[in-house]
Image: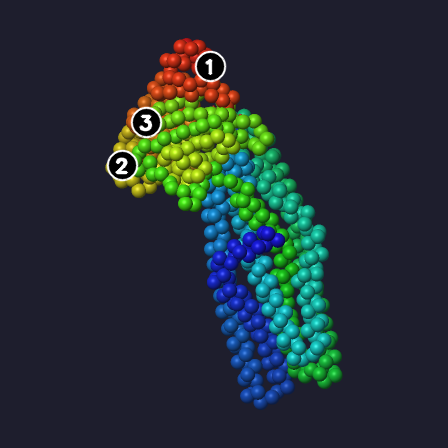
Amino acid sequence: MREWLRLMSWARQDWKGLVPAAVAAVMTVFSHAGLLAAGAYLLSLAALQPPIGALSAAVAAVRFFGLSRAVCRYLERWSAHRVTFDLLAKLRVKYYQRLEQAPAKAVSAVNGALLERLTGDVEVLQYFYLRVLLPAVVAGAALLGIWLFLGQFSQGLPLAVTLFFLLTGLGLPALLRRLEQPHEEQIQEKREQFCAVLTDALAGMTEIHAGSRQTVWRERLVRAGGELAAAQEQRFRLAGLQDAGCGFLTQAAISAVLVLAAAGVRGGEIRGVHLAMLVLAVWSMFEAAQPLSHIFGHSRETLAAAGRLFGSGEDVRPASGMKSGHWQPSSVETGHSRLLVKDLTVRYQEAGQNALEQVSLDLPPGRKLAVVGSSGAGKSTLLSVLLGLWPYQEGSATLDGLELSEWDPDRLCSHFSVVTQDTYLFAASLRDNILLARPRASEAELAAAVSLASLDGLVARLPRGLDTVPGQNGRTLSGGERQRVAIARAYLKAAPVWLLDEPTNGLDAATAAAIMHSILTLAGDKTVLMATHRLVETKLMDEILVLDGGRVAEKGNFQSLTATGGLFGRLWRLEQDRLQ
Ligand SMILES: Nc1ncnc2c1ncn2[C@@H]1O[C@H](COP(=O)(O)OP(=O)(O)OP(=O)(O)O)[C@@H](O)[C@H]1O
């Protein structure tokens, strides 16, 4: 019921488009009935060979309904689809924005399932209007028309037709609905599974090849596709049964009308010239009952899709989000931001282990802080929380005195230039990929970013320079080159705080040193927080925070930490041994 109300209120946003579409749909059905009825009447009357003038009204009616049917059908299709696609576009954007504001949800969900929701579920919602709301309105109007029209001729006819109309539109579908229900749920489940396997296979293509697992994955895909097809086959069988049942009931209704009307003619209640008209008018009105029979199926599908779509938005709590009336500091403009973290505790699962526990740090403007620790210590988690990508359960994290959870996500992000361990490049030109950070940057600013990030050598080598498309996720670029693109983006963004998550991960020592040099030169007097595994890079930082199992194990600068022989000292010696 909740989903129904939400769908109705969703559709209500565009009621100005919906009403004309519904009117056009009703007029189409009436025009169709009018055309057949007037045609049948004309032929019956003509068979009695009356003076030609007596046929003129019927001829005019046939012409009128013939034209109005075509025009109304066109208007109905055009307006209904236009308004539906408008609504779907709005819904897609809204759903994407929700995910964007709460990426925690996106990260924890299976990619394929998310993709399926953004495409499949949103697509299914078009049925709500086109195949649920609209047919219901049209069927209601048709039933009213049947009563008004047939009531002129006999009392028994509307009753008989209504009975068959309701059996066709509601009785039979309600019966089949019970049989279909388990298949619907199964189809959705199988479809999500198939999408998840497919997206996994595409994303992990390299690993699959490297591990010679092509056959296994091909079989997995074929199996998932086969299970989906089998589930769909069952449902299509029932849909076929429903179509056959509808056809049968329509013919039964026509036969009943014929028998009743013929009896009426014999009894003098109905004129013989009206007999064919009544039969054909009823036949055409059943055009409105047949779509009604699919309402159950489509409403179930749309309600399930609405539940997943609206539901997924609902259980997401943005990690950051502006509370109305809050003053939002604007240190982006002044270039000075202070990050203060106090006793921060973060858990990924409600009852799970803490990924961060009682972590505190102070990052005044211009300070350079390195966060180190072994794998799983919580470095990336800390950065995700600061970026507003993950909520925290306890403690506080403020930027310029305002809790991160109070910040508007866009405004919060505008304070950070980010370089992650694996920079994503879109399937667009290198220019567009760099300008992502500041789309309105001038050519001079872009050129400066390219040169300062040491990308000019690469740009000179590329066939179309900055306009070259480096493939999906920069397939044609090396890891170091991709990181340089990220640095150029960070520089262009000119945010007061640089957040770096292992920016030299996977690069050789020489490239890593060159990248670090570029970063620290470009960051200049900006604040820097860098998570890293390479302890040598921490020599250049003002302070080092050593995390161990989500807790702060040590704090200090490079000299003090190596001198004490604690965790950092041990890790440093291990790194030195490995390099020798
Ligand atoms: N999305 C997630 N869902 C559940 N647990 C997670 C998630 N991301 C990280 N964790 C867990 O949180 C802990 C900290 O992970 P985190 O990625 O922050 O460590 P890290 O120090 O950055 O590790 P690495 O150096 O390997 O990147 C780990 O135990 C990890 O398994």
Q: Which amino acid does label 2 sit on?
A: Glu
CA distance separating discs 3 and 1: 27 Å
- The mark found on residue 445 in the picture is 2
Query: Of 570 and 232, which appears nearest the observer?
Result: 570
CA distance separating discs 2 and 3: 23 Å
Residue 253 placement (x, y as % from top left): 70, 69
Q: Please indicate whether residue 257 sits to the left or right of residue 5 in the image.
A: right
At horizontal 56% and vertical 27% (from top left) the residue drawn is 353
At horizontal 56% and vertical 51% (from top left) the residue drawn is 124
Q: Does the residue labelled 2 lie within 8 Å of ligand 1?
A: no
Residue annotated with mark 1: 567
Query: Of 290 and 381, which appears nearest the observer?
Result: 381
Work out whether residue 78 can be spotted. no
What color scheme is it?
A: rainbow
At horizontal 40% and vertical 12% (from top left) the residue drawn is 562
Quadrant in the picture for the C terminus: top left
Q: Which amino acid does label 3 sit on?
A: Gly
Residue annotated with mark 3: 366
